[in-house]
Image (cartoon, helix red, strand yellow):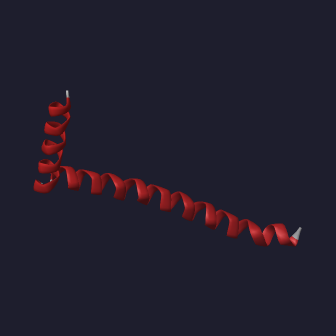
Amino acid sequence: MEVAFSLAPIILYLLFMGVAVFVLYLIIQAAVRNGINSSIVGKWVREKKDADLNDEN
């Protein structure tokens, strides 16, 4: 019984850290994606990709 009480805070801490890391991952992923898409190079790459797709069809 004492082992269960000593492991509970560790398990809760790991669960909390896992959720926090996942949320940070989502935030950073969205920020990087939006940053790349709004940059000059990102716009150029998107236009080039769209032009290549239109040339194939």
Left or right: 12, with 19 as reference point: right
Q: Please, which residue is most extreme toward the front here?
A: 56
Q: Residue at x 69, y 65 (%)?
A: 11
Q: Position of residue 43 (x, y in %)?
A: 13, 48
Quadrant in the rendering for residue 2: bottom right
Left or right: 31, with 10 as reference point: left
Left or right: 28, with 20 as reference point: left
Q: Please, which residue is most extreme toward the right here?
A: 1
Camera-side residue: 14 or 47? 47
Q: Residue at x 49, y 57 (%)?
A: 22
Camera-side residue: 47 or 25? 47
Camera-side residue: 37 or 5? 37
Q: Position of residue 42 (x, y in %)?
A: 17, 52
Q: Residue at x 28, y 52 (%)?
A: 33
Camera-side residue: 45 or 19? 45
Q: Please, which residue is most extreme toward the top here?
A: 57
